[in-house]
């Protein structure tokens, strides 16, 4: 029998074996099993199913808008490479 994998450092949730998610390598700070918590940045209630206003959901945006958001902070270059 293998040792359970710690999937969440907040509530202590574990999983019996790797499932191909990032928590196979690093436990998350919160998960769907956690009760709502207070966001340390804005003070609003936050949960895995109802994020506070600090979060920007990218899963519903077109790819071009996601690139613009990421490029806007200056850390991600989305310009196409041009060959001389």
Image: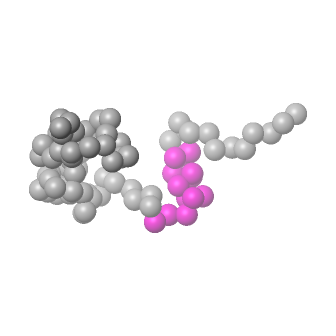
Rendering coords of residue 53 (x, y %): 29, 58
Please tell me how many numbered marks the rendered image carries.
Answer: 0
User: Which image quadrant is residue 5 in?
Assistant: top left
- Per the image, is 47 magenta? no
User: Which image quadrant is residue 77 in?
Assistant: top right
For the N terminus, the quadrant is top left
Rendering coords of residue 31 (x, y %): 22, 51
Q: Which residue is drawn at 53% across and 36% down?
A: 75
**In this image, 9 relative to 51: left or right?**
left
Q: Which residue is drawn at 45% across and 58% down?
A: 58
Q: Residue at x 11, y 56 (%)?
A: 35
The majority secondary structure of the magenta stretch comes to: helix
Is the residue 11 above or below the residue 84 in the image? below
Q: Residue furthest front?
A: 1
Rendering coords of residue 72 (x, y %): 54, 46
Q: Can residue 34 be seen in this view?
A: yes
Q: Which colour scheme is used?
A: one colour
**In this image, 18 relative to 57: left or right?**
left
Q: Residue furthest right?
A: 84
Q: Residue at x 24, y 63 (%)?
A: 50
For the C terminus, the quadrant is top right
**In this image, 65 relative to 47: left or right?**
right
Q: Is residue 40 visible?
A: no
Using the image as rendered, state which of residue 71 and residue 9 is in the foreground.
9
Using the image as rendered, state which of residue 5 and residue 59 is in the foreground.
5
Rendering coords of residue 45 (x, y %): 17, 57
Using the image as rendered, state which of residue 11 and residue 73 is in the foreground.
11
What span is in magenta?
A: 60-72
């Amino acid at each position: 029998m293998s040792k359970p994998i710690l999937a969440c450092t907040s509530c202590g949730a574990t999983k019996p074996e790797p499932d191909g998610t990032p928590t196979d390598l690093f436990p998350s700070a919160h998960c769907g099993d956690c009760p709502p918590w207070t966001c340390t940045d804005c003070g609003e209630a936050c949960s895995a199913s109802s994020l506070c206003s600090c979060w920007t959901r990218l899963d519903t945006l077109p790819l071009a808008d996601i690139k613009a958001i990421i490029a806007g902070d200056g850390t991600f270059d989305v310009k196409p490479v041009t060959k001389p």
